[in-house]
């Protein structure tokens, strides 16, 4: 794993509003003592993919320019403890559109466990193991992301 900081990768790889929003989320990460380590093995060897943890538990994953230039996305992580099941958030209504429902007929990869899940009080079928995905989030989505990952941090460290 590389020690290259996520801020350096964002500044080097992204531009305009996309860069500004990514840096805003990065500031949130830093303010909450979340550690983001660049993964550089296997599939991720030549990509800008970061595993972000708090107290050694995954909070989120961030990928920069994985599928196209000047893009990034943030995913949650389904560690199967269903921390998101009954979380009550002011942003819950807006968050539901970011639930990662898989539309594929076949599983995306070996071991994919699309399941029926309750996310912020609402049930969904075929939820991807990442549970939440924010692609090129705008300012409003950043607010939602912060609410989600603050709830995750509180779950990890009540």
Image (spheres, rainbow, N blue to C red):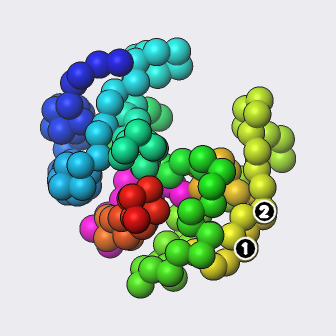
Q: Which of 71 and 44 is in front in this view?
A: 44
Local SS, label 2: strand
Q: Does the rendering let one see residue 125? A: yes
Expressed as whole percent of the image width and height from the top left, the position of residue 63 reads 40, 38
Q: Let me know if residue 146 is in the magenta part.
A: no
Local SS, label 1: strand
From this view, report whether residue 30 is shown above or below residue 64.
Answer: below
| Residue at 77% in and 29% down | 110
Label 1 crowding class (10 Å Cα cut-off): few <14, some 14-19, many 20+? few
The magenta region covers 132-141
From this view, report whether residue 101 is shown above or below residue 108.
Answer: below
Q: Earlier in the sequence, mark 2 or mark 1?
A: 2
Q: Which of 31 and 104 is in front in this view?
A: 31
Q: Nearer the viewer, residue 44 or 158?
A: 158
| Residue at 50% in and 81% down | 88
| Residue at 27% in and 68% down | 139
Answer left or right for 58 relative to 143. Answer: right
Q: Let me know if residue 139 is in the magenta part.
A: yes
Expressed as whole percent of the image width and height from the top left, the position of residue 66 reads 43, 32
From this view, report whether residue 157 is shown above or below residue 85.
Answer: above
Task: Give residue 123's mark.
Answer: 1
Q: Name the residue under label 2.
A: 116
Contact between labelled residues 1 and 2, with CB atoms less than 8 Å apart: yes
Q: Quadrant of the C terminus?
A: bottom left
């Amino acid at each position: 794993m590389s020690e290259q900081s996520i801020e350096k990768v964002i500044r080097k790889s992204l531009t305009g509003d996309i860069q500004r929003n990514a840096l805003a989320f990065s500031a949130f990460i830093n303010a909450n003592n979340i550690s983001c380590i660049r993964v550089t093995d296997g599939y991720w060897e030549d990509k800008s993919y970061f595993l972000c943890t708090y107290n050694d538990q995954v909070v989120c994953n961030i990928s920069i320019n994985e599928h196209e230039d000047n893009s990034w996305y943030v995913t949650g992580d389904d560690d199967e403890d269903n921390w998101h099941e009954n979380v009550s958030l002011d942003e819950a209504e807006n968050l539901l559109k970011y639930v990662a429902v898989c539309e594929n007929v076949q599983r995306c990869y070996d071991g994919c466990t699309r399941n029926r899940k309750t996310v912020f009080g609402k049930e969904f079928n075929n939820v991807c193991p990442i549970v939440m995905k924010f692609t090129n989030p705008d300012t409003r989505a950043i607010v939602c992301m912060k609410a989600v990952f603050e709830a995750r941090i509180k779950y990890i460290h009540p």
